[in-house]
Image (tube, rainbow, N blue to C red):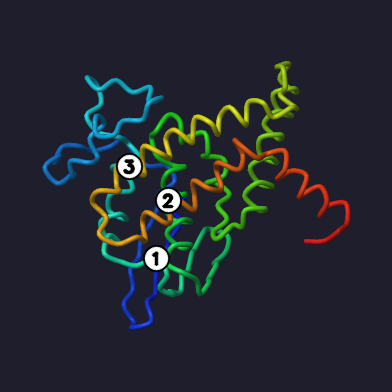
Amino acid sequence: MKVKYEFIFPEGKTREFEVELDRPEIDTGNSGTLPEWTELQHCQCSNCPLDRTKNRYCPVAVDIAPIVNEFRHEHAFQKVTVRVQTEGRTYEKLTGLEEGLRSLLGLIMATSRCPILSELRPMAVHHMPFASSDEFILRTVSLYLLQQYFASRNQQEPDWELKGLVARNQQLQLVNQALWQRIHSICESDSNLKALLSFFSMASSVSFSLESQLQKLRTKLESGTG
């Protein structure tokens, strides 16, 4: 399964990227082309389970490197048309470059070989570009509860209190912080950095303010408003 992103700038230039959701293992045969900041030891996550002696490169850093390099000189505030083609439908939005990059980078990170970020893979399979904060919370919690339902059906102990979801996103926060540090020094403009910060802000809402986010959704659901 592939998802295609197309960034169309006002002056007519376009940049296209295809994300393969089931990517093969990292090919480091031509490692000379990989930037130094993709090495595992460079700003390695404090909770990273990978062994440096067996893994020279950070899986997610290698995956996002082409995007980071392509947009390293671009400003986050500029308006672009972003067109996203999935197997089932096409999305298109005139928006700030930051939002388009947040959506693309989020998809790539969720489908990387990172053992921690791969927890987000179910959301990537049902990718929703340009999701709002409310949509992110709704999809995150709904998918997690569905997983707990299937666990219950398989005679496993379900987590209806969402404790595991909060714990998982606390781990994701540590990864997010380290990733931002990785690319901070090599980005001459702010598009990549603001895109990552926007993605991190959404993820942190599951860790630090989940209850208040759920109360907001409860109010809207009970009142029937969107």
Closer to the camera, 161 or 89? 161
User: Which residue was labeled with disc 1?
Assistant: 76
Q: Which amino acid does label 2 sit on?
A: Leu
Tell whether 153 sits left or right of 64: right
Q: Is mark 1 on a helix, strand or loop?
A: loop
Q: Is residue 142 above or below residue 104?
A: above
User: Which mark sits nearer the N-terminus, 3 or 1?
Assistant: 1
Q: How many marks?
A: 3
Residue 149 % position (x, y): 74, 29
Q: Name the residue under label 3.
A: 181
Query: At label 3, which amino acid type do we have?
Result: Gln
- The foreground one among 83 and 221 is 221
User: Callout 1: few (<14), some (14-19), or many (20+) C-alpha neighbours within 10 Å?
Assistant: many
Please give the name of the residue rendered at 26% of the width and 64% of the height, measured from the top-left corner.
73
The residue sitting at 39% across, 69% down in the picture is 7
Q: How far apart are marks 2 and 1 (CA)?
A: 11 Å
Disc number lying in front (3 or 2): 3
Residue 47 spot, x, y in % from top left = 41, 24
Checking the image for residue 196, the label placed there is 2
Q: Which is more toward the observer, 173 or 141?
A: 173
The answer to which image quadrant residue 225 occupies is: bottom right
